[in-house]
């Protein structure tokens, strides 16, 4: 799909003509059996069934599935083989009905196949002549006379053939076996358990059924042979006399094999014969083996008078005539492929199984090659429907137009009226024509005929030079046509293409789309008139107020005609039309027609198929037509009477009186012929499918349905592959021809119902049982998931009594179908289970045409259309989530084909049914990257990985999608993020509750994720769905003001406290008031100071506990019965009450920091305890039930811990004094694991560890700030808090105290935070009265990203590429784990760090700071093992052998010193800039003004130099990695030099264009020195060939900021900033892009949402590290093509290890290591002074300490 090469392919002239005809609506110009997109390869197999059984079985099992896959993958079309003998009872092979059907399907294959269409398998057997199914009376009587004359007994003919006067001319037909053979009906469809081929005992009563069948089969064989003998003898005699001509006699004397070969090959063109193949198998000396009994299958034999078995020479001669004369004649005149092989028999066994197997193996290979060859030669890849949605849409409607018009049989005045309306007239403007009528009145058929004929009508009327445009839409038949916007858009596009109008952009507003349509109508002319046909306006969706018809143009130009149809009483469509169109002549009503006219039409139809009815039968036909004359009813009567024989007894019940009853009768007759279970399931699947099914899909699905197989299979067919016979599908199609119609959708032909009436009745009959429907949806979902594809075997189990028994009563209008489960106890004997391959195809999302070009593909639209629908209907939420939504291929394909919004709708649908927060986050993520990925779908995997990696530990179900991105993403984007530091973008669900937070009394979260209960001061208590903003339930307590609300833990009861001092107890789910209880104070402790309101209340599972202001009593109320139980009497005024989780105890907090414990069951006081901090009151009580402890927290934050193991004698364990500031406690929370307690005060947040009861963290607010509330994250590692007068939520990390994120609440300042423990949700209330629901998991995911807090200035990657060391301009260097992205160590320096270098292994690090100090660090332990003071360092370098360090200074002498000891090797007296050490560790190369110097690392002296002329400076230089002695440098004269250090000579000089290097920013050299990459700060990449001097410009995606060349020189990695004129792309700052230099193609793009400050490329694996402005880093890897290296690389990335098992993720504690305060060595001028305790040896490398830098000359010696 969208291939780079296909666009340049010259269009096929036939395709172009078809496309022109389709777009202009010239239906008659389209081929009768071919709409450009509705294609399939259909191959008819012509063979004798018995002697080719092995070949056909082998082809079926091994070859057909491969060819099907080949066609689907390369052409997006089906491959279907029509072999009607396969799977059919051998006794039915010579059935006249089967032979008739074979000839019909042979004709279909020859006409409709897109590729090969016919395969002949010819062996040594001619086959027997057929038993005639029907013979004209004149012929039959002539044959009967000849038989009598020949002395033959004709009684059998007279008995089995019956005269039928309803045939025209009259015929004799063969009576059905069911009528003639006793017990035949009961034995023909034998259940699978009746003759099971496995060693088990058949169920009782099955032996008699099997015996009856065998008896009938034997009887029929004798009868059929006798009938054939009479016909053959009589016809030969008549032929000899000349009474019967040879052509006439042929049908009685030919075998089916000869007939089919003659029909397929006899009169065809050479071009057509290229699509046919014949395989001839000759067996040498076969006659001698005729006596072997097994050989009767492979040759025609007869038994002579003496009982000898011998070959039938007459049949053999006819075979030779066909095989050796007819076929060679065809070959001589054409290119027919014929393969002839001679097989030699086994001397004893004849044509043995071994010999046959050898031949079959060769045939299979040749068959596959031939089919592929012919397909490639005849079938073209058609991407039109894939790339052009409008073209695909109109093709679907043209396909339906052709189908519907072919059914239209009733010529009427209405058609003439419409034809007259279409002719242009000179005069005023016209109005649309409205056709209306009831259901089944024929509106759709009429409009289809109009659309079909309109082109030719207008051409005949206006002249052949006229080129009309006809646009037809059958509204409701496609998704596009139902939606008004899509309907108008497709019509506008079709008009624009026809009239060559350029639409610069499609309007966004629907009103503008209507204006565009009106403007385009004006483009029509008398040379190009325009006709628009819109059927079924009532099928429009109500979106955009489409049914009000405001969009329909009423005043039409003179050359435009619009014909619409509608039902008269649906949605008020006709009434609105009458309000728009006032001319009554513009309305045509389709009513019931005249009975006589219908009778005449019926007569003509019957004569068309050479049938009629008797005068007696006609009476009942007339009676039926008197009741109804709707076109569909007439057609249904025709379908019934066409099968009537002249002797059939007909009465008034033989025909139905309504359309509905006639359709039901039709369905029941099909059930009688084909089997109830098969028809129920087949039609059920077609009806429940979202857009219809193909023949092959229906065959596949029924083959997966064990209940169908169990009903129709016979035991001999229990073998691989286990499939239903195709003849059942073919007969079903034939029986429902005209009702089950074909519809082309893209590259497939679907079976759909011809109208909605048929669908509704089929739904009622076959989809009424909910259990069956659920099972069928599930099976369809399995099919489109590909669950049983690729040879995976499905268990076949069949219990004969397990399936529903369906019956219908002809005399009743109601038909009920019930499912009867098995009543038998012998499950094992009645049910057998075996596994078989059902040969269903793989169901990828796309069919990949070329694995090397992943963007060339055909979309599996069938899976796209059906899978989500059936998964949803069958409730398979896991399959929906992981098989579709979390499937990268699905997402990529949907976006690639432009269905982004459809993908989002499917995700939203899945979320609504499963409520998985991962789906919601994914939908939000996709919306945020919509612009990016719709513009560049290839970047989808990288964009998703960047955004999902930070949250995958919080949202673990996203793991599946990340793994999918790893697997399939690199096909399209070679950048794979390993660790993402992108800040999570998150927006909460918001619900406006009131105008001010002051009106909100309380908000309660519930067990349901998005449901909250809100109490307002006006007395209302409302239950809201925050996500949908729907009010679910409301309680009105307007008589009193609400003080508070509480829910029991099971959410059964909702309790409301009012200012009337009453508790209202409600049934929470029904919102009904159960009881009202008054809270009173006792007479013993009256409240002083007047009226007191309820001060607080709490709930246990069965009780409500409430207390009044300044009261010492707690009232206990029974929730179930709603009455007061007793009062708890406390020592002091009650301040808070907490119940134990088990509901047994109540802890009552009081003034003077006192708490009393009461037993809730008895009301007894068990104990009272008082804290030593007795000045305040108990603010909160926490019950730690897991460790039997209770914590009292007072109003100042101090707490006391009590052991409650002995609840009657609590023991003080710990007193903790938190009284430090004067701030009040505003919130207290116990962590989920009860390991931590968070105390939020106005001025600080404290976290206590409950194991040791110590404060482990304390966060203080700034002087002007105050905390509103704070909560812990689920894992307790983060704190989420809000501040007073701010509209943000802050996230702090407990281990570092760092503020990791700040989320802005757009609704205003946050005044309240409420945590929902059920779903880890956080509710925030803004000052504006808006409630927001935040997911704490997602919020705290932001704290997973480590940051230094300052911009990354530079970074170093260790040689093993496992750690990254960053500098950010501070006193610290941070050591990051490359895989996890976590900071593991911090190296503290005395001053600001300026330089940092690592040894190759990364074990040692050398740094310098602005305090003139150098440090050597052990990176594994963090120890500062050596420190040097005394000189300010400008650059540090380490030699490649890790032995020496070069410290460059600007003011003093630079030094080379030994890393192992710290001793100086030499001084360097020249000042060098941007120095580099050569690969051989020989020279230090650097620049100074106009010189390039090479300084010896052994002596420190300048050994080599290059001096530029005066005024010329060296701009930049690079070493060539693979050539250590060569340097490439650029001078200010814009000249590039390649200079040999060893020879001090210029090897090559390249002059650049003038001003080329004016803005030089970067310069990269390939390893071999052939290419130079120059960056100038613009949007071009300049690739310089250093050998030829040629310069190539490659356009970049934006202004290049940094670029890096990979070590192997194959890839260029660069970061570019977006152009200013581009639209804002959801916060994208820049883009990371990888370019393959070989072809200049960008193979990966990844957006960066932060400002990058450093870019680094690893030397070994192609890993990318980007440092960002906020102090974070991102790591990426590059994979060009999917290979094993990718799998290894991603598997070793800890980011993926976290994904594989989230539980393994343990954040390592970050350790900080300080510098040495005393220097080990001090540099002075050119000497160094060591302290006494300095280490002697720092080296761990084990190399000899005598190693020194060497000169090149020494190396050579």
Image: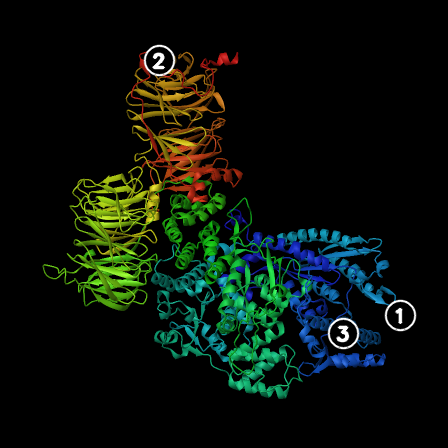
In-front residue for pair 1167/976: 1167
Residue of label 2:
1469
Q: Gap between marks 1 and 3, in whole Å? A: 22 Å
Q: Residues within 10 Å of mark 1 (few under 14, many from 20)?
A: few
User: Which of labels 3 and 2 is toward the front?
Assistant: 3
In-front residue for pair 917/1522: 917
Q: Is residue 759 left or right of residue 1159?
A: right
Q: Gap between marks 2 and 1, in whole Å? A: 125 Å
- Label 3: element kind: helix
Between discs 1 and 3, the one toward the N terminus: 3
- Can residue 1330 be seen at all in this image of the molecule? yes
Q: Is residue 254 left or right of residue 1564?
A: right
- Label 2: element kind: loop
Between discs 2 and 1, the one toward the N terminus: 1
Q: Is residue 1586 left or right of residue 1341?
A: right
Residue 340: % across, % down: 76, 54
Residue of label 1:
305
Residue of label 3:
219
Tag of residue 1375: none
């Amino acid at each position: 799909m969208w291939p780079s090469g296909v666009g340049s392919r010259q269009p096929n002239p036939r395709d172009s003509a078809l496309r022109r005809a389709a777009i202009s609506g010239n239906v008659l110009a389209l081929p009768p059996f071919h709409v450009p997109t509705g294609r399939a390869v259909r191959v008819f197999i012509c063979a004798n069934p018995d002697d080719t059984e092995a070949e056909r079985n082998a082809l079926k099992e091994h070859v057909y599935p491969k060819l099907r896959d080949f066609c689907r993958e390369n052409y997006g079309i089906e491959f279907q083989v029509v072999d009607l003998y396969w799977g059919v009872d051998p006794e039915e092979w010579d059935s006249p009905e089967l032979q008739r059907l074979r000839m019909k399907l042979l004709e279909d294959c020859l006409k409709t196949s897109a590729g090969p269409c016919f395969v002949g398998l010819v062996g040594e057997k001619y086959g027997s002549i057929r038993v005639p199914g029907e013979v004209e009376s004149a012929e039959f009587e002539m044959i009967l006379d000849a038989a009598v004359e020949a002395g033959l007994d004709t009684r059998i003919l007279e008995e089995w053939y019956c005269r039928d006067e309803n045939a025209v001319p009259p015929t004799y037909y063969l009576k059905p076996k069911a009528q003639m053979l006793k017990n035949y009906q009961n034995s023909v469809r034998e259940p699978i358990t009746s003759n099971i081929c496995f060693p088990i005992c058949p169920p009782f009563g099955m032996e008699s059924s099997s015996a009856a069948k065998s008896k009938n089969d034997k009887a029929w064989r004798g009868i059929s042979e006798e009938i054939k003998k009479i016909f053959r003898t009589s016809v030969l005699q008549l032929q000899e006399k000349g009474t019967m001509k040879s052509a006439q006699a042929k049908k009685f004397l030919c075998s089916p094999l000869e007939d089919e070969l003659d029909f397929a090959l006899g009169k065809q063109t050479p071009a057509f014969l290229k699509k046919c193949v014949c395989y001839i198998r000759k067996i040498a000396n076969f006659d001698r083996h005729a006596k072997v009994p097994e050989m009767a299958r492979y040759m025609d034999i007869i038994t002579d008078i003496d009982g000898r078995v011998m070959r039938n020479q007459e049949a053999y001669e006819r075979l030779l005539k066909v095989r050796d004369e007819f076929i060679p004649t065809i070959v001589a005149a054409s290119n027919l492929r014929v393969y002839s092989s001679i097989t030699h028999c086994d001397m004893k066994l004849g044509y043995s199984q071994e010999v046959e197997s050898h031949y079959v193996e060769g045939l299979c290979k040749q068959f596959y090659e031939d089919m592929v060859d012919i397909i490639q030669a005849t079938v073209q890849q058609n991407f039109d429907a894939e790339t052009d949605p409008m073209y695909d849409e109109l093709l679907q409607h043209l396909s339906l137009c052709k189908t519907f018009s072919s059914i239209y049989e009733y010529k009427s005045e209405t058609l003439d009226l419409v034809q007259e309306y279409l002719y242009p007239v000179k005069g005023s403007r016209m109005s649309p024509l409205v056709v209306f009528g009831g259901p089944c009145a024929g509106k759709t058929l009429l409009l289809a005929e109009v659309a079909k004929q309109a082109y030719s009508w207008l051409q005949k009327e206006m002249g052949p030079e006229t080129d009309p445009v006809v646009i037809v839409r059958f509204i409701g038949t496609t998704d596009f046509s139902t939606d008004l916007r899509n309907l108008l858009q497709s019509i506008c596009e079709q008009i624009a293409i026809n009239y060559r109008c350029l639409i610069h952009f499609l309007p966004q507003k629907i009103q503008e789309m209507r204006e565009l349509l009106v403007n385009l109508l004006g483009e029509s002319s008398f040379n190009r008139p325009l006709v628009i046909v819109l059927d079924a306006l009532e099928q429009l969706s109500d979106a955009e107020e489409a049914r009000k018809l405001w969009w329909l143009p009423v005043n039409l130009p003179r050359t435009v005609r619009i014909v619409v149809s509608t039902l008269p009483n649906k949605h008020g469509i006709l009434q609105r039309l009458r309000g728009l169109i006032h001319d009554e002549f513009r309305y045509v009503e389709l009513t019931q027609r005249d009975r006589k006219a219908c009778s005449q039409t019926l007569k003509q139809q019957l004569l068309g198929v050479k049938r009629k009815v008797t005068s007696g039968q006609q009476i009942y036909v007339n009676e039926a037509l008197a009741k109804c004359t709707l076109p569909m009813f007439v057609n249904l009567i025709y379908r019934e009477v066409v099968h009537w024989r002249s002797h059939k007894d007909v009465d008034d019940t033989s025909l139905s009186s309504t359309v509905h009853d006639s359709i039901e009768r039709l369905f029941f007759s099909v059930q009688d012929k084909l089997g109830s279970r098969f028809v129920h399931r087949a039609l059920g699947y077609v009806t429940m499918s979202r857009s219809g099914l193909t023949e092959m899909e229906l065959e596949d699905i029924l083959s997966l349905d064990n209940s169908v197989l169990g009903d129709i299979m016979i035991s001999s067919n229990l073998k691989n592959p286990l499939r239903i016979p195709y003849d059942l599908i073919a007969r079903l199609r034939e029986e429902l021809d005209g009702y089950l119609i074909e519809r082309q959708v893209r590259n497939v032909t679907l079976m759909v119902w011809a109208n909605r009436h048929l669908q509704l009745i089929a739904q009622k009959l076959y989809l009424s049982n909910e259990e069956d429907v659920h099972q069928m949806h599930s099976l369809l979902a399995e099919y489109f998931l590909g669950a049983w594809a690729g040879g995976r075997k499905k268990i076949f189990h069949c219990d004969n009594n397990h399936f529903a028994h369906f019956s219908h009563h002809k005399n009743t209008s109601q038909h009920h179908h019930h499912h009867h489960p098995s009543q038998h106890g012998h499950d094992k004997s009645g049910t057998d289970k075996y596994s078989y391959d059902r040969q269903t195809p793989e169901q990828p999302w796309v069919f990949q045409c070329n694995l090397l070009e992943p963007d060339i593909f055909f979309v599996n639209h069938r899976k796209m259309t059906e899978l989500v629908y059936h998964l949803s209907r069958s409730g398979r939420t896991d399959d929906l989530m992981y098989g579709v939504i979390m499937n990268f291929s699905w997402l990529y394909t949907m976006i690639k084909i432009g269905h982004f919004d459809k993908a989002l709708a499917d995700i939203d649908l899945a979320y609504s049914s499963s409520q998985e927060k991962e789906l919601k986050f994914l939908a939000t993520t996709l919306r945020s990257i919509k612009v990016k990925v719709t513009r560049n779908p290839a970047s989808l995997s990288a964009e998703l990985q960047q955004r999902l990696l930070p949250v995958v530990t919080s949202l673990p179900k996203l793991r599946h999608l990340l793994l999918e991105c790893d697997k399939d993403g690199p096909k399209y984007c070679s950048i794979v993020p390993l660790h993402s530091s992108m800040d999570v973008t998150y927006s909460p669900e918001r619900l406006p509750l009131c105008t001010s937070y002051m009106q909100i009394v309380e908000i309660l979260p519930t067990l349901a994720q998005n449901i909250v209960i809100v109490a307002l001061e006006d007395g209302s208590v409302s239950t809201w769905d925050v996500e949908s903003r729907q009010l679910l339930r409301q309680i009105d307590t307007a008589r009193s003001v609400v003080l508070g609300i509480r829910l029991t833990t099971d959410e059964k009861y909702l309790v409301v406290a009012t200012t009337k001092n009453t508790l209202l107890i409600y049934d929470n789910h029904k919102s009904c008031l159960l009881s009202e209880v008054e809270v009173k104070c006792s007479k013993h402790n009256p409240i002083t100071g007047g009226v007191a309101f309820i001060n607080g209340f709490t709930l246990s599972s069965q009780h409500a506990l409430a207390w009044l202001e300044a009261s010492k009593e707690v009232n206990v109320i029974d929730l179930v019965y709603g009455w007061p139980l007793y009062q708890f009497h406390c020592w002091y005024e009650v301040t808070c009450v907490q119940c134990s989780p088990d509901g047994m105890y109540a802890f009552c907090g009081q003034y003077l920091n006192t708490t009393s414990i009461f037993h809730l069951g008895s009301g007894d006081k068990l104990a009272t305890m008082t804290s030593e901090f007795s000045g305040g009151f108990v603010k909160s009580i926490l019950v730690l039930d897991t460790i039997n402890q209770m914590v009292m927290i007072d109003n100042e934050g101090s707490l006391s811990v009590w052991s409650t193991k002995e609840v009657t004698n609590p023991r003080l364990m710990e007193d903790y004094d938190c009284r430090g500031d004067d701030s009040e406690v505003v919130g207290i929370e116990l962590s989920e694991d009860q390991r931590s307690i968070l105390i939020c005060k106005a001025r600080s947040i404290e976290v206590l560890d409950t194991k040791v009861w110590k404060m482990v963290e304390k966060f203080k607010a700034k002087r002007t700030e105050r905390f509103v509330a704070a909560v812990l994250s689920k894992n307790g590692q983060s704190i989420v808090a809000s501040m007073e007068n701010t509209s943000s939520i802050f996230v702090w990390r407990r281990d570092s105290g760092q503020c990791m994120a700040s989320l802005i609440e757009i609704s205003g300042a946050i005044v309240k935070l409420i945590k929902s423990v059920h779903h880890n949700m956080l509710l925030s209330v803004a000052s504006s009265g808006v409630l927001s629901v935040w997911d704490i998991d997602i919020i705290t995911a932001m704290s997973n990203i480590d940051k230094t807090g300052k911009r990354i200035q530079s970074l170093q990657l260790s040689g093993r590429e496992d750690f990254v060391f960053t500098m950010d301009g501070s006193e610290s260097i941070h050591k990051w784990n490359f895989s996890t992205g976590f900071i593991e160590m911090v190296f503290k320096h005395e001053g600001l760090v300026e330089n940092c270098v690592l040894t190759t292994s990364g074990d040692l690090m050398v740094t310098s700071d602005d305090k003139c100090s150098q440090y050597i660090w052990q990176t594994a332990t963090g120890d500062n093992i050596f420190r040097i003071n005394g000189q300010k360092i400008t650059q540090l370098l380490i030699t490649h052998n890790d032995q020496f360090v070069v410290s460059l200074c600007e003011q003093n002498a630079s030094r080379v010193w030994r890393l192992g000891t710290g001793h100086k090797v030499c001084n360097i007296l020249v000042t060098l800039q941007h120095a580099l050490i050569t690969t051989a560790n020989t020279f230090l190369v650097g620049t100074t003004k106009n010189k390039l110097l090479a300084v010896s690392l052994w002596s420190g002296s300048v050994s080599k130099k290059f001096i530029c002329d005066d005024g010329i400076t060296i701009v930049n230089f690079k070493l060539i990695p693979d050539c250590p002695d060569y340097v490439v440098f650029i001078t200010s004269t814009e000249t590039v030099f390649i200079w040999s250090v060893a020879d001090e000579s210029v090897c090559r000089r390249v002059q650049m264009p003038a001003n080329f290097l004016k803005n030089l920013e970067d310069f990269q050299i390939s390893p071999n020195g052939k290419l130079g990459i120059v960056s100038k700060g613009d949007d071009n990449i300049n690739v310089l060939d250093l050998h030829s001097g040629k310069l190539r410009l490659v356009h970049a995606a934006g202004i290049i900021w940094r670029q890096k060349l990979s070590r192997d020189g194959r890839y260029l990695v660069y970061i570019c900033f977006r152009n200013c004129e581009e639209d804002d792309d959801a916060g994208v700052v820049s883009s990371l892009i990888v370019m393959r230099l070989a072809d200049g193609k960008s193979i990966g793009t990844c957006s960066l949402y932060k400002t990058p400050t450093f870019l680094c490329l690893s030397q070994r694996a192609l890993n990318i590290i980007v440092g960002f402005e906020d102090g974070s880093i991102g790591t990426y890897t590059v994979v060009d093509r999917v290979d094993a290296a990718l799998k290894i690389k991603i598997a070793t990335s800890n980011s993926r290890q976290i994904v594989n098992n989230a539980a393994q993720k343990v954040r390592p504690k970050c350790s900080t290591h300080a510098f040495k305060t005393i220097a080990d060595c001090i540099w002075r001028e050119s000497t160094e002074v060591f302290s006494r305790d300095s280490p002697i040896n720092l080296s761990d490398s084990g190399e000899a300490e005598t190693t020194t830098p060497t000169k090149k000359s020494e190396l050579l010696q």
